[in-house]
Amino acid sequence: MSLEQRWLKAAYDDSQWLVPLYPLGTLYRYLMSRRDAQYSSGKKTVWQASVPVIVVGNITLGGTGKSPLVAWLSRWLVQRGYSPGIVTRGYGGKAVNYPLHVVATTDPAHSGDEPLMLAQQTGCPVVADPQRPRGAQALIEQGCDIIISDDGLQHLALGRDIELVVIDGARGLGNGRCLPAGPLRESPNRLSRVDAVIINGEQRHAVGVNGVPMVLAPQHWRHLHSQQRRALVPLPFTLPVHGIAGIGHPERFFNTLRTLGVDGDMHPLADHQRFDKQTFQFVDQRPVVMTAKDAVKCQALAPPDSWVLEVEATLPPEFEHWLAAKLSALFERGYTDG
């Protein structure tokens, strides 16, 4: 495991070797609380969009399933006649100019992997910009009538109407401490102020609030180079495989592979891993299985027998009804329904 992965495991397992970092975690929590108060009091400027803004974020590091929720939310809004756009930081990418309008053929070195993946999966307008208000304005000028801010909970300069927080059900809040003593970006009390907490997968730890269950359901296999789709069963490749995952919580992907009957050597990589030919220099030639997030960076590097597992989020009807009512109330309060 990399140093980052060892630290995350320690933070979620409440390892004692993090105890010397507890004072720094307390300081970080205080600084985040003070920053929040500055935006709430008006000492720091909050830009309010002319359309509703839905934030999808988390309070933990290590990957929780935000991107599948953003993709689900985008499709759900389109089905109801809205024209959503996604604004994102574009972590891992560096563009010459911002805002960057991300399309299916954008170089991931410019956009980052998650914005490109979302553009390919949803077909919705996606803009990457470190300054989220500027990126949101670019989407509005493009005709979007609802903005989804991906991983935007801590980006307080962009006003928001609905906050959705995703938590990994298997890992919860870890040791409950803020960086660098634990995995939290801010205090657990933040969960009491958001509109909904989404629990990804089976909930094994209490988080202090009632959560909405979300399941990431495998949909199909996709051959990386031909883009041909194949059913989940029978497996379109031979076993064993090399499984790779450059995401925040690789073990979740590997567990999903095992439930589908896929075995082999599993290779956890760093989140937002930068791939090169060396990544695929395995001792033996086997099929390679990867996530959709990794796939956007591997088209020209991965071996011919490479496959992508596509997954989609599923949420209960009660959540859909609640969200529809929440949006209706927003438009009744003053937004112009597109």
Image (cartoon, grey):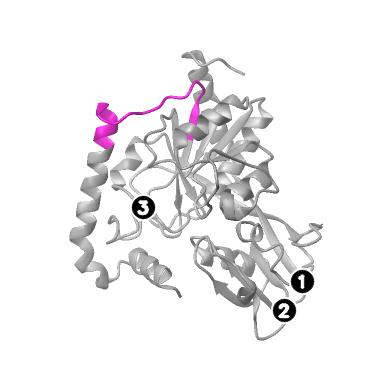
Residue 305 shows which numbered tag?
A: 1
- Residue 168's place in the image compared with 152, above or below, is below
Amino acid beneath label 3:
Ala
Q: Are marks 2 and 1 in contact (CB under 8 Å)?
A: yes
For the residues labelled 3 and 1, the Cα–Cα distance comes to 42 Å
Q: Which of marks 1 and 2 precedes in the sequence?
A: 2
Query: Would residue 114 be found to the left or right of residue 151 on screen?
Result: right
Amino acid beneath label 2:
Arg
Residue 40: give x, y in percent of width and height.
28, 30
Reply yes or no: does residue 4 show up in magenta: no
Discs 2/3, front: 2
Residue 303, image quadrant:
bottom right
The outermost residue toward the bottom is 283
Check disc 2 and report its element: helix, strand or loop.
loop
Residue 113 shows which numbered tag?
A: none
Disc count in the image? 3
Q: Which residues are magenta?
A: 36-54
Query: Would residue 271 be found to the left or right of residue 113 on screen?
Result: left
Residue 206 shows which numbered tag?
A: 3
Q: Closer to the camera, 10 or 324?
A: 10
Q: Are marks 3 and 1 in contact (CB under 8 Å)?
A: no
| Mark 2 crowd level (few <14, some 14–19, many ≥20, 10 Å Cα) | some
Image quarter where the C terminus lies is top right
Identify residue for label 2. Answer: 286
Question: Residue at 41% across / 41% down in the picture?
Answer: 153
Q: Is residue 43 visible?
A: yes
